[in-house]
Image: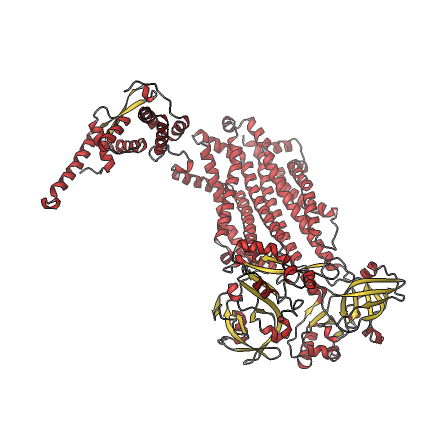
Amino acid sequence: MPDQKFKDPPKWPSRLLRWFCRAELLEDIEGDLMERYQMRITSDGLSKANSYFLKQVFLLFRPGIIKHPRLPFLRNHNDMLNKYFQYTARQLLNAKNYAVINIFGLAVGIAACLIILLYINEEWSYDTFHAESDSIYRVTTDETEDDGVVRHLANAYPPLAPLLASTYPEITEVCRYFPSNLSVKNPENNTINQESQFFFGDSVFFEMFTFPFEQGTAETALDQPNAVVLTHSTARRYFKGEDPMGKSLLLEGGIDIKVTGVIEDIPANSSLQFDFLAAIPLVRKVMGDWALHPQHSWYYPPMYTFIKVPNKDDAERLIEGMPSFSENHLSERLAEQKRFNMQPLHRVHFESLEGDLEPATNPSVLHILLAVAFLILAIGCSNYINLALSRGVQRFREIGMRKVLGAGNGHILMQLSVESFSYLALALLLALGMVQLALPHFNGIMERELSLWTNGGWYLSLGTLLVLGLMGLINAFFPYLAVTRFDLNNVIKGGKSLKVNLNGGGVIKNGFVVFQFVTAIALLVATFTIQQQLRFIQQKNLGLQAEQVMIIPIRDDSIQNNFSTAKELMLSVPGVNSVSAISNFPWERGYYNFQSTINGQGKSIEANLQTLLVEEDFVPTLNMEMVQGRSFSKDFGSDATGAFILNEAAARKFNIQNLDGLRINMSSINAGDPKVGEVVGIVKDFHLKSLHHEMEPVVLTVAPQSYFLDNFVIRLQTDDLEQYINQLSSIWQSEISERPFEYFFLDEAFQAFYLKESRLAKIFSYFAILALIIAGLGLFALAAYLSERRMKEMSIRKILGAAVWQIVGLLSRDFVRLVLIAIVVASPLAWLGMNYWLSDFAFRVDLHWWVFVGAGLMTLAIAVGTVSLQGLKTARANPVESIQQD
Amino acid sequence: MSKYRLGEFEEVVLLTVAVLYGKAYGVAILSEIEERLNREVSIGSLRTVLNRLEKKGCLSSEFGESTAMRGGKRKRFFKVTKYGQKVLQETRAQRQQLWDAIPKTAFE
């Protein structure tokens, strides 16, 4: 050995080595390393020796040298695990009611969560099933009206799509999609129906969107100018099992179309829902050549316009540049009115735009539902944890004993985990059963066709398992924390400090109880408020009587041309009280807007008037109330050419107190002369839009020509509705029109405005009830254990003369306090949430204090009821029995 | 026939330990292999093999003296056990058998 000074090798590699190397190998390995290191210094120099040393340390990092990782799950615990399952089974059988409450609570929570997740999963999957859905966008329009009001429209206009395609090479495909309502006839078997889901699309439609073909091919189906593709069930409706390929169908006006393909029925999570998809050149035949004219169709017809941009960067640039497109490529006049935007296909379902395909889903509603479902789950978990904590005395002795016999904290945690996961597994099984039972009902409310088997994707299952895993750990961890924090001696001896600890450790427990009741109360308040608002809406005086009012859409020029004949015919049906007509209902496409001047009483106001074009008998048919003046009448010949009725809102807006000499000059309604005439009356404010909207100033005037009137409005008698409808139908078909007889009732249309709200009300009421049931059950079990623990105390009190009600009071006092705290916490939260929800309505109920008090009292009653039930049991027990034991 | 079959490197290490009879500890084995067979061996791979051989019963080991060069750490000396000896001999016999079986003309 050469004599030389010993040099220390680099510090951190040695430290690393010491950390990972097995203790029994460390000494000689380190010695060898150092010896080699010293040798290297002499032969190669210090820096080479250092890198050699480092390399050797890294090469030592290999199995056989590194320590066995000391992780509990790498050790073999199979036998112990078996035991844990045995203990769990014993626990479960020992306290059956406790287990039932626990498993039931957890199962309800899981089931609620699963149903909501299924629903949300479907909502989020909207329009994502197309092969290239990521690169499809919709072009939407912001349209500025003459009065400066901007409307956000879901559609664009026919010339835009070709213009975009020729301007931007990044856009590889453009496709227009246009809804229509046509009658379709199969000439072979005379099947005829009015089809409201009849759409037109460009020939690339089926290449852009993925709808699997049963017959025909996506690439060629729409190549011919008279081609039409049917969905499976539509084909069945028209061809009854015959092969539809190549067959003819007749559109109204005798337009011949040829079936060139049949696709599978459209999945529910598609925004594009159609029964027929016809080639777009047919629009010319149906509406006239102007409909697709590159200059003349910039205002009508509105067409949904989809574009495909495969490159993400291109798409982002286009999205930015789209608003300025109209300035650069359209005439000045058009550019002032229209601005275009691009919306990714998967957003179509979530952004609420005027004239959209389907009503959009508000994403915040989904978030609220999700939050509520998880709250229910958390209530179930709280029950589990709370009951585990309160069963303390028995459990603590058992666990103390285990520790004495050598169980480490890891073992205890493992045992508690096995227990909590077993409960969860049982709860999951139960929950799946519950979901299966509850889904049809849920589907009924939400109008869906969800099922556990077709809608539960793998990531949903994975997500559920993850959440359950997390829950299992949380459920095991809280009892574990409580158990392991105790002094072993006390646990075994059952000394005084154990009891102190148990009662003092109630902060967590009380916290959970408060949490449960906060949730329950908040949900109750929400349910009450939503239902109150719905009732308010239903009972609100709408300014017109919508019940028994039947609307028949007129889709036929010939009816309009013979309007008075048709009216007389319908009036001849017994039960028909009056017949009138209106141009359109403002909830569909808003009002007509006409530039007008209001003259008289020393003023002259220029305004853009929102106008409804009606028939003379409209006001009495809807039982609207005149505040001043008279309604239209045939007796005044001038009414047909120029007479106006304002609503109160319009009168307020233009500061009109009386009608003396008041005249309106309305610019041409139909390319003819301006409509000039006097204001004959003021009508009480009436609602023809949902109560989400403010009352708008509206002017009624008689339609100058009957072809403006697109809807019959008919008031029927109440007694035998079905018979009147049948008679109307037969008269319609025999004498009025060849078209199918279709109708709806005005009050039903109003109800449909609040579909979202009434669904929400139902879902919330179910959730509130579930929350109350689970929380109540938990409280019941909790009270049972606590009163059991205080049995002796109560027995002695009773012997010393305490009355039953005093004992019940003593036992319930703590819980009542918790519920009171919950009321205090829940009220402001619920108030904020509900105020936010109500802000969506222009006409809304006020949040009354008694709603909160009501929800609080209801909860309190349930809590006191459950607890005092237990208290009574304790109080009425024979005191001797419990005292005698020791 | 012993059940345990030696790998090539195991055989080299086992033989080297035998060569260094009485003086076979980590660094010495390394140097010997490097010198005789002209191959680079890391401490890690050597130590794993030594471990494995010891576990199989081919080697035994005990701590020896420490030196200043080793930072005061003791050396671990390895010795071939009787079983190790048998394994080595068997391996050699097998090789020999194969050599013997080669026809004379094969390598001409």
Rendered location of residue A384, percent (x, y)? 54, 41
Q: Is residue A34 above or below residue A159?
A: above
Q: Nearer the viewer, residue A665 or A518?
A: A665
Residue A117 visible within the image: yes
Furthest-left residue in this view = B104
Residue at 18%, 33% in the rendered image: B86
Q: Nearer the viewer, residue A231 or A422?
A: A231
Q: Nearer the viewer, residue A791 or A660?
A: A660
**Can you say which quadrant of the picture contains the N terminus of chain B?**
top left
Figure label count? 0
Residue A450 visible within the image: no
A59 relative to A471 in the view: left or right: left
Residue at 60%, 47% in the rendered image: A371
Colour mode of the rendering: secondary structure
Residue at 51%, 37% in the rendered image: A477
Q: Is residue A592 above or below residue A242?
A: above
**Can you say which quadrant of the picture contains the C terminus of chain B?**
top left
Rendered location of residue B19, percent (x, y)? 20, 28
Q: Quadrant of residue A671?
A: bottom right
Q: Nearer the viewer, residue A830 or A247?
A: A247
Rendered location of residue A542, percent (x, y)? 76, 61
A788 relative to A685 in the view: left or right: left
A487 relative to B7 in the view: left or right: right
Rendered location of residue A321, percent (x, y)? 61, 56
